[in-house]
Image (cartoon, grey):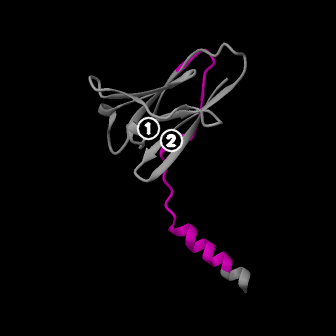
Amino acid sequence: MKNLFAIMAAMVCLMGCEKIDIFTPMNVTLASEGQTMSIETSIQPQSLDILDYDGNGTNMPEYDAATGTYTATYLWLTATISESSFYDGKYTLVLTAEKNTTGKARTLYVGGMDKNYSGSMKVRQE
């Protein structure tokens, strides 16, 4: 009986939780020769960051007032969001990867905030 009560309580909690997709998709793989890709996101541009697995990286994007563009760059990856790309509650995030000359796969995480929610997207380059 206690197990049944615990299961029902967990189900009620899960039903009340709201899932927020800040990035679509959550994982991206970019070509080793370098690539630019556009992705829809609901993060606020001023919260854009790029971090590695250890949390090192760029925590605040640079803002260009003339173009209304937020840009974060760390190691081999640049992430850009233009204020003018806002449409239907989303921005267009542009990812640009430099050519991978290391011969090894590499990974960074692009993140940000949407109101009170945070999220990150795994960006891998092979």
Q: Are marks 1 and 2 in contact (CB under 8 Å)?
A: yes
Q: Amino acid at mark 2?
A: Thr
The answer to whether 66 appears left or right of 104 in the picture is left
| Position above or below: 13 against 107 | below
Q: Nearer the viewer, residue 24 or 108?
A: 108
Q: Which residues are magenta?
A: 6-35
| Residue 115 rendering spot, x and y as whole percentages | 40, 51
Q: Nearer the viewer, residue 124 or 88?
A: 124
The answer to whether 100 appears left or right of 88 in the picture is right
Q: Nearer the viewer, residue 57 or 11?
A: 57
The tag earlier along the polypeptide, 1 or 2, is 2
The answer to whether 114 appears left or right of 52 in the picture is left
Quick check: is 107 in the magenta stretch? Answer: no
- The numbered disc on residue 40 is 1
Residue at image coords 63%, 78%: 8
Q: Nearer the viewer, residue 72 or 28?
A: 72
The quadrant in which the N terminus is found is bottom right
Quick check: is 31 in the magenta stretch? Answer: yes
Is disc 2 placed on a helix, strand or loop?
strand
The answer to whether 72 appears left or right of 53 in the picture is left
Q: Kindly give the residue lying farthest to the left in the view shown.
A: 66
| Residue 67 rendering spot, x and y as whole percentages | 29, 24
- The numbered disc on residue 24 is 2
Q: Amino acid at mark 1?
A: Glu
The quadrant in which the C terminus is found is top right
User: Dividing the picture into quarters, in which one does residue 125 lie?
Assistant: top right
Crowding near the residue tagged with mark 2, few <14, some 14–19, many ≥20 C-alpha atoms within 10 Å: few
